[in-house]
Amino acid sequence: MISIRRLFLPVSLLVACAAAAPASAEPRVLAGRARTYEHLEPNSLERITTPEALLAELKHPNIAPMRLWKLLEHGEKVECLACIPYVSRLLYSGHAKNREIAAWWLRRRIFGVFGPGEVYSRVVSTLSDAKQSEERRAYAANAIGEFLNPAGVKHVARAAVDDPSPLVRRAAVEALQRLNHEGPAQELGTALSDEDESVRLAALRAATSIHVFSSADKLVELLGDESPAVRKRAAEAIGALKIADAVAGLVAVVSDAQESPEVTAAAIWAIGQIGDPAGKASVQARRDDPNPLIRSAAAIALRRL
């Protein structure tokens, strides 16, 4: 009987507390809400921007970026079909943040964006239209990435390897990174061999960001790239992905007295990340190097070898 009383005692206390609470208590205002919202109920934030107010301001030709971002963020849940044409124009704005938040707002729409002939399909068409300027095609690639629609992977993957403009190819590679995909035919790996340095660097950044990357062997080849920036980034990518087969190539870089300190330090770091004892001797040989960057990298790597 004692154990039964103990079981029901907390329930009795809860009932008593509920009875003592005032029936007409005001809605609790969450701590930390900005002063702008202090007179609003906690569930009413989306009411700040009405469809009419949003449309009126979007029609303004010189709306300030900060004002635009505030409007669209506050209007995240606002359904305004008439606003869509105005927001879609911002996908080609010269301001990167304008393009980003425009795609963010559009991809949350239930109607008017993803249907046949609507915003998304027009952006895809712009990317593949050779008559469009390279800047506009690059912005279209940015938008496809920001829409986060898996259907866009094949389009930016094709542009990443086939578009004649390095600007567009780089934007397409960055879109693949945003979509977390290497492309249906591993186009991201193909981009690692692009003739343009900026495209190769973008592909290297993407290789360490996506969940599945199948062209690790091509990273090793880039240790001999003509660009020091690419060689450095390739070594860092190899270390981040812990590619054990690349140790011999990294040792060659570390042993090259003519290599730049930045690339050498990156290769030493990568050997430490992989943790293969086969690279230890080359790292030890640079432990007392005159360059402090190399010495520091060697000291850290040796702790892992």
Image (spheres, helix red, strand yellow):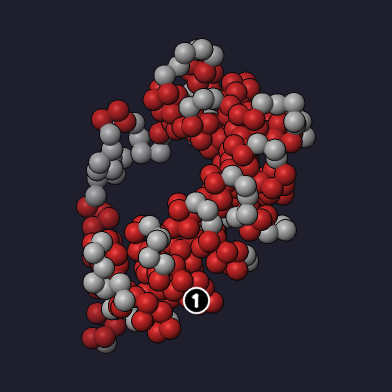
User: Which quadrant of the view contains residue 128?
Assistant: top right
17 left or right of 46? left
CA neighbours of label 1 inside 10 A, class few (<14), some (14 to 19), many (20+): some
Whole-percent x and y of residue 29? 28, 40
Q: Residue at 28% x, 38% y: name it.
A: 33
Whole-percent x and y of residue 201? 52, 50
Q: Where is 94 relative to 276, above or below?
A: above
Q: Is residue 228 visible?
A: yes
Whole-percent x and y of residue 75? 48, 30
Whole-percent x and y of residue 172? 62, 43
Which element type, helix, strand or loop, lies under badge 1? Answer: helix
Q: Residue at 63% x, 42% y: name it.
A: 169
Q: Residue at 30% x, 72% y: name it.
A: 286
Q: Residue at 54% x, 77% y: name it.
A: 245
Could you tell me the amino acid type at mark 1?
Answer: Ala
Residue at the outermost right position = 116
Q: Is residue 212 visible?
A: no
Q: Where is 87 relative to 282, above or below?
A: above
Q: Quadrant of the C terminus?
A: bottom left
Q: Quadrant of the N terminus?
A: bottom left
Say which residue label 1 marks.
248
User: Which quadrant of the view contains residue 297?
Assistant: bottom left
